[in-house]
Image (cartoon, rainbow, N blue to C red):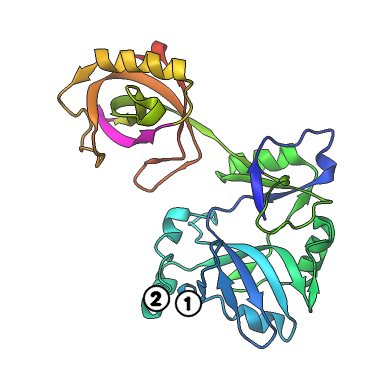
Amino acid sequence: MLATPGPLPSAGVEDRWAFEVKQDGQRAMVYLPGDGTVVLRARSGTDITTAYPELPPLADALGSRSAVLDGEIVALDDQGRSDFERLQQRMGLVSAPAKAARMAARVPAHLMLFDVVHLDGRLLTGLPYAERRELLEELGLTGPAWSTPAAITGHGAEAWKMAEDAGLEGLIAKRLTSRYEPGVRSKTWVKIKVHRLADVVIGGWVAGHGRLAGLPGAVLVGERHAGLLRYAGSVGTGWSRTERTRLAELLQAAATDTCPFTRIPPVAGARWVLPRLVGEVRYTSRTRAGRLRHPSWHRLRPDLLT
């Protein structure tokens, strides 16, 4: 079951929703037949068990009970937040179990459990979320590489502020009466991302294709550090066609043959501009190299033209 992007439920109805921290990792269904074995499957259905050797001991925690659990495999940073960039070092090691074991010691994975869809031979998808959640918590699944993070009923604004202040990616709001709908992106589960703002300098752009032919498909942006412009990523969403057309005129007027970034970005077909246009972008987080993750254009900042 997948969540639909949307706003925070209003204060008038928030007591009908539960709020969970949005984790940034690899979604996994966990199959525990009750015989001491575990199978982990990604959203694609691929068996990823061998990539995470620290997780099979979960079977011992459940004993002879059978279950199918839903969760997210994450790698945590020094402050206990899920860090997708760290987890990428663990993903894709299904066919390399020896390397997966070595990486488990360097970058431990942790399974965050948030739903149970089958338990002791009983299919639970028709039960409301609140009942499934109660059953999940009764399992007491807390261990060295797995846990059942808390869900808060109501108090959405407080949960949102907590997520924002803690630098988390956002929240998942789940209607208490929602059934589990396998494979469905449901409006009874809503993902609400925390978006941050940054002022960036446009240093280049790449042409669009198809309906965006002749217009910028994305701009290449940077941030100034000690007077130098460091590349911070590309932004390709957030404009109307009118805004793209206006931006195209500004970019053409600022064209130059010289890359303004300290290092030339590895972007095919890049066209450079004088670094004088400043824009404001929304983003969710940053990579360790300082690149913006999931950036989208917010507005041009003519008051900050350089």
Question: Can the viewer see residue 306 in this picture?
Answer: no
Magenta highlight range: 225-236
Calculate the distance from the C-alpha at mark 1 to the C-alpha at mark 2. Answer: 8 Å
Q: SS class of the residue under badge 2?
A: loop
Q: SS class of the residue under badge 1?
A: helix
Is residue 210 inside the magenta stretch? no
Of callouts 1 and 2, which one flags the residue occurring earlier in the amino acid sequence? 1
Picture coordinates of residue 203, whole percent (x, y): 27, 26
Residue type highlighted by circle 1: Thr
Residue at the left extreme, as displayed: 257
Picture coordinates of residue 154, whole percent (x, y): 80, 44
Tag of residue 50: 1
Question: Can the viewer see residue 234 in this picture?
Answer: yes
Picture coordinates of residue 156, whole percent (x, y): 74, 40
Tag of residue 69: none
Quadrant location, the C terminus: top left
Q: Quadrant of residue 235?
A: top left
Is residue 235 inside the magenta stretch? yes
Which residue is rendered at x = 34% and y = 14% of the image? 305
* Magenta stretch, main secondary structure class: strand
Q: Is residue 294 left or right of residue 163?
A: left
Picture coordinates of residue 117, whole percent (x, y): 74, 66
Which residue is rendered at x = 68% and y = 80% of the image? 61
The residue wearing badge 2 is: 95
